[in-house]
Amino acid sequence: MFDDNTIVAIATANGIGSISIVRVSGKEALPIALKISKRQNLKPRLATLSTLYTKSDEAIDEGLLLYFKAPFSFTGEDIVEFQCHGGVAIANMVLDEVLNCGARIANPGEFSKRAFFNGKMDLSKAEAISKIIEARSEDAVKLLAKQLKGELTNFVEDIREDLLFMLAYTEVSIDYAEDDLPTDIFEKIEEKLKNIKEKLENTLEASKRREGMIEGFKLAIIGKPNVGKSSLLNKLLNYDRAIISDIAGTTRDTIEESVKIGTHIIKIVDTAGIRDETSDIIEKIGIEKSITAINEADIVVALFDNNKPCDNEDEKILSLLLNTSNKQILKVLNKTDLNNVFDISKLDDYTNLSTKESIQPLVTKIEKILDTNTHSDEMTLISKRQIDSVFQTLHHIKESSMPLETGELEFFAHHITEALHFISNITRPYENDEMLDVMFGEFCLGK
């Protein structure tokens, strides 16, 4: 829980701007605001223009006061916002006066923490707020906005409701075995288990496929030395980030940069050239990093040199691609402004390109892949904590099937209880009283 101190913090970013907001939350928020503004009252949800004063009656600024009366506020407590002119000095002076009146500086995330404990939001919405502030792409904002609206909360609540149903009926079957119970109850439970399993599996798969929406999808550029990887990187970034030369092995380490394509943020990794063999220990480490980059990427762009024959190094690249699963592979035949020497029969599906000219055909293909991965109504988890909770829930759902089939209802109930705890971790902790409410609400056990 949290203490009942009144807390304060500057709610706008540091620097010069048109407005700075100082937010106060707690039972003393209104008295403090009245003292600093020398007003008798503030009407809730009405912006009031006021002069703000120091304790020695010196004017600080003229700004707006907004009063949100509990429980109709973000934290569920009384909140007052001081909206003053932008700038570090003014906001700090207002902050100091609020502190002088008895408030304390809020800890990181404390406003949201109070909102959670006061029932104004659940954990999934709190996580969405944290991430939407740092969102770098339109895709991330749209996804997080869905969670703020309660999409994940509703998803979890539907599963909780079904699990509570199963647990309640199971406990009744154990404790009141001689009473008349619906004959088809276990068929309904099996059907609900099947549906939950499918939901959770689909959610985990979609979340894995779309995890780059928050931090940026990863795109790895691979190929043998001197095939044009660094030239492609520079072209995508529209500036010379990587050194280009005719000397093989110029790029000896991975280079990572971010760029926006369409509405998507992608992290581009330019890897060291993958050779068939090298005696250079530094280059070997670079090649190992390249292979790691391939494994971690969502999209792999494999470059081949149109002006050179397909050799052992190209064959090695092709074999790496064959062993790469769950990746979007884009094969690119680069340097098409030169004479064709490369055996194109080695490439089943490829894009012709010249990094000295337009790379738009490749950019279009990348954007299409990203659009496919992001433009979907599938439920998507936004944090490792949420993914772990769903994974553990799914584990116990699967483990519950055998005890249900064999009639070992105590073991079945154990797994359903564990599933309830794990799925509830996403939004709000599960309390045993919830199951009892279902039991005594659904059955006439006091007869």
Image (cartoon, grey):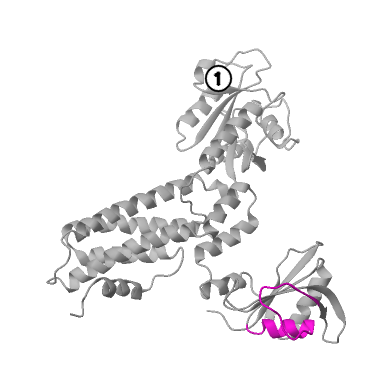
Q: Give the residue type at disc 1.
A: Asp
Q: In this view, does 292 lie to the left or right of 104?
A: left
Count the marks: 1
Q: Does residue 274 appear in this view?
A: no
Residue for badge 1: 311
Locate residue 327, reporting x and y percent.
49, 37
What are the residue bounds of the magenta stretch?
A: 27-50
Outermost residue toward the right in this view: 58
Residue at (61% x, 69% y) in the render: 109
Locate residue 251, reporting x and y percent.
67, 34
Q: Nearer the viewer, residue 140 or 288?
A: 140
Residue at (53% x, 42% y) in the render: 375
In the image, residue 308 above or below residue 358: above
> For the C terminus, which image quadrant?
bottom left
* SS of the residue under disc 1: loop
Say whether residue 277 is magenta.
Answer: no
Residue at (55% x, 62% y) in the render: 127
Q: In which quarter of the image is residue 394?
A: bottom left
In the image, residue 92 above or below residue 217: below
Q: In this view, does 396 lie to the left or right of 240?
A: left
Locate residue 182, reporting x and y percent.
17, 63
Q: Quadrant of residue 338?
A: top right
Q: Does residue 301 appear in this view?
A: yes
Outermost residue toward the left in this view: 178
Locate residue 385, reporting x and y percent.
48, 60
